[in-house]
Image (cartoon, grey):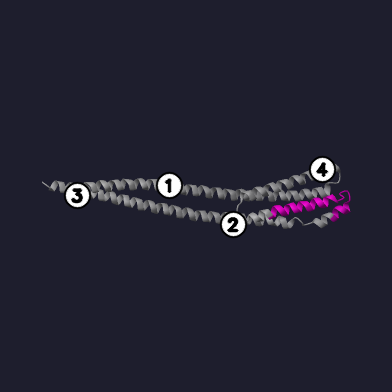
Amino acid sequence: MKTHINIQIRLMAIAIFSVLITGLSSLYMLDSVQRAENKASREQQQLLIAALALEEAHTQFKIQVQEWKNLLLRGRDADAYQKYFASFNHQTDEVQKRLTEAQTAFKGTQHEQFEGLIANHKKLVEIYLKTLDTAKLDNPESVETIDKSLRGIDRPLDAVFPELTKHLAQAAKNKLSEDNALHTAAHRKHAWWISICVSISATLIAVSFWISIKTQANHKITP
């Protein structure tokens, strides 16, 4: 009988230990899943920030092109020239600022495309400014010649913005799909582990009670 009691105590101790391990491992796995979800949420947020910054950069670029046209067509006197020239430079800074924000927020295969977009925008601005140095804005014929020579020069760059936005949207979609698959797998693994631990604990407790009942029954039978 003493042997049965010792076995029962050991089984109960193992069962309690198993329950503790189940609880601790459950907490650890839940924490791991939560950290993974937080990381995924941050990455998705970065993609959203990149997309919004890119969209804003596109808007500012369109305004910049309009400011160039204003400068070319309306900057005849000194005051008007300074006004539109300052606006053009301001838009240059705004476009570069938004593109840099988008590039910083997005870490992926389109990172090099951001670099190319930033570099090409700078080159376009250089062409505008170089042309402006030799322009005679008080001469309608000179203005018309410049306008014709640079007409449509912004279109290739303008077309890159929606293309890059499309890539970002696809990257966000792929990221969401990937994260959902990882989260599902993690939750399944967690549920499987808990089921195993609970089954072992329940079995040990059941065996312990069975030994206890058997021991008591034998004790009653023995005179």
Task: Give the labeled residue for mark 4.
Answer: 82
Q: Residues within 10 Å of mark 4 (few under 14, many from 20)?
A: some
Q: Amino acid at mark 4?
A: Gln
Q: Is residue 4 left or right of residue 92?
A: left
- Between circles 4 and 1, the one closer to the viewer is 1
Q: Which of pointers 1 and 2 lies earlier in the amino acid sequence?
A: 1
**Percent of width and height locating residue 189:** 42, 54
Tell me the SS state at disc 3.
Answer: helix
Tell me the SS state at disc 4.
Answer: helix
User: Residue at the top extreme?
Assistant: 79
Task: Give the labeled residue for mark 3.
Answer: 214
Task: Give the labeled residue for mark 2.
Answer: 170
**Percent of width and height locating residue 110:** 63, 56
Q: Inspect the magenta stretch and tell me whether residue 123 lies in it.
A: yes
Residue stretch rendered in magenta on the structure: 116-145
Task: Give the labeled residue for mark 1.
Answer: 28
User: Residue at the left extreme?
Assistant: 223
Q: Which of pointers 4 and 2 lies earlier in the amino acid sequence?
A: 4
Label 3 – label 1 distance at C-alpha: 38 Å
Residue at 72% of width from left, 54% of height from top? 120
